[in-house]
Image: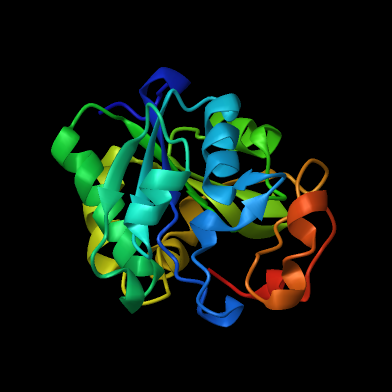
Amino acid sequence: MSRASSTSDTVGLLLAAGGGRRLGGRPKALLEHRGRPLVEHAVRVLREGGCGQVYVVLGASSQEVRARADLTGCVLVENPDWAEGMGTSLRAGLNSLADQGSWGRALVSLVDQPGIGAAAVARVLAAGGTTGLAAAAYDGKRGHPVLFAADRWTEIARTAEGDRGARVYLKEHAGEITLAECGDVAEAYDIDLPEDLARLEAGEGTSASSAHAK
């Protein structure tokens, strides 16, 4: 597939399977954000940023997520191996996209980063470039979301293990990544620790846990 793609062939891939181990076992998809499950906010961000379709990878308490969250129009992907780490969710999502076969690019985002909004998504999509590999940057440091052309998915899925996600692949291909600076429109903190929960209502500020590489 051509890497000179438009947003019309770009799918959003939201990794939302985490069990919130450091949050006392509260599934991240179901954390409350402005009165609704956090996964709904993350889906809306992808859509408003330019992803016409969104795939959501579920794992922890997936049946409860399906029952409580409005994921109308999303393609839901089950990851039975979610407890083994985020890499299994990335692999499950990319494999599902490859099986479907109609998308040229995938924008991967994480459910636990509510400080990253549609503006950052749009910037990364626009930065896709000829290499088919782009990522948001915060003060020059690579972060999420990350854009992958379809011809990269097989290798990424092969190297996605444990909590590393695409880290190994991105390190090996660092010279090919187009970075889109998003520090002026987004904040890349994670909701990982109990003290981070206060940020869900405000949706702003930074967190010590934002330093955790994904």
Left or right of 203: which side holds 150? left
Q: Is residue 189 left or right of residue 19?
A: right
Q: Is residue 211 above or below residue 66?
A: below
Place residue 19 in its image quadrant. Answer: bottom left
**Left or right, 174 with reference to 48:** left
The answer to which of 49 and 140 lies nearer the viewer is: 49
Nearer to me, 27 or 155? 27
* Residue ranking furthest to the left: 99
Location of residue 23 by image quarter:
bottom right
Query: Residue 55 at what x, y percent from top left?
Result: 36, 39
Corner quadrant of residue 100: top left
Residue 132 location (% of width, % of height): 41, 39
Q: Relative to residue 187, is residue 167 depicted above or below?
A: below
Q: Which quadrant of the figure contains the N terminus?
A: top left
Q: Nearer the viewer, residue 208 or 125?
A: 208
**Residue 212 visible in the picture:** yes
| Residue at x-position 30% and y-position 26% | 2
Note whether residue 127 is visible: no
Residue 125 position in % (x across, y down): 54, 32
Q: Residue at x 46, y 46 (%)?
A: 68
Which color scheme did the rendering employ for the protein?
A: rainbow
> Where in the figure is residue 25, as x and y percent of width and height?
50, 76
- At x 78% / y 51%, what residue is drawn? 201
Which sits in the foreground, 8 or 45?
Answer: 45
Number of numbered discs on residues: 0
